[in-house]
Amino acid sequence: MRQPLVAGNWKMNGSRDSVKALVDGINAGMGDISGVDVLVCAPYVFLADVQTLLQGSAVQLGAEDCATETSGAYTGEVAAPMLAEFGCSHVIVGHSERRSLYGESDEVVATKYARVQDAGMVPILCVGELLEEREQGITENVVARQLDAVINASGVASLANAVIAYEPVWAIGTGLTASPQQAQEVHAFIRARVAAHDAEVAAGVRILYGGSMKPSNAAELIGQADVDGGLIGGASLVADDFLGICRAGM
């Protein structure tokens, strides 16, 4: 049985004061949440603060990205082993914003995925299609290409220590949401794609939905057979909304 995971992705938002208020609010509401793993992925500069704020909490800490290299003359980059030192359990790789705004290729994403695992953490591998790709009917082709890049580089067995997040890019920050049926179709495709290599790994890997999940639609989305939680953007910046999604996964 796959335990749901609700992961907040704060993106480039927050101040030290607002982050403290947010984490305090999440911690305060965790008492009635069970059967759901909860994770917050913070901007690099807040990791130390959040690590301290989460001491003794059931909430896990993650990062939003990492470098392709582990050390060296790469000004401005942050290596996976550095993130592990700050208590990160997970790192997001291949987010649609990294792919579209910063031109990260499937190969770059696959390298980052491997770096996260090499540092003893769990990668959250993001895959998903643009609106024009959905309209062209090539959603499965796009998702398969993105997923296969990691399987070919690290092996399907690596997915036993990873999370996959399906992001319909057209539903991120737009207010649009894939219907539960649309989400389930792609999640089922992803699981089947993995199962073609290893059925046991496919049965165990958690696949999150990452497209404008809110407290009002979370229960129906997470209730789908192959949707194992959410990668939450905007709603993760409001403690009550984020906790509402967590409760929907119970």
Image (cartoon, grey):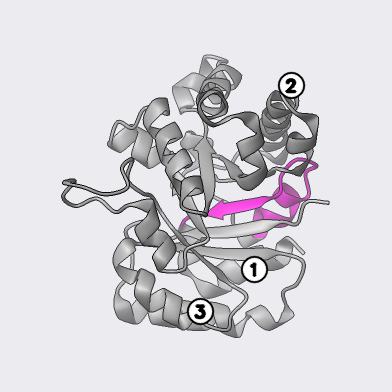
Disc 1 or 3, which lies upstream in sequence?
3
Q: Which residues are magenta?
A: 216-233
Three-letter amino acid code of the residue under disc 1: Gly
How far apart marks 1 and 3 lie (CA) works out to 19 Å
Residue 2 pos. (x, y %) = 78, 51
Q: Residues within 10 Å of mark 1 (few under 14, many from 20)?
A: many
Position in image of residue 125 (x %, y %): 52, 41
Residue denoted by label 3: 54
From this viewpoint, is residue 175 visible?
no
Q: Earlier in the sequence, mark 2 or mark 3?
A: 3
- Percent from the top left, x then y, of residue 65? 38, 50
Q: Residue tagged by mark 1?
A: 244
Q: Amino acid at mark 2?
A: Ala
What secondary structure is marked by label 3? loop
Query: Amino acid under label 3?
Result: Leu
Above/below status of 39 relative to 150: below
Vertical comparison of 69 with 34: above or below: above
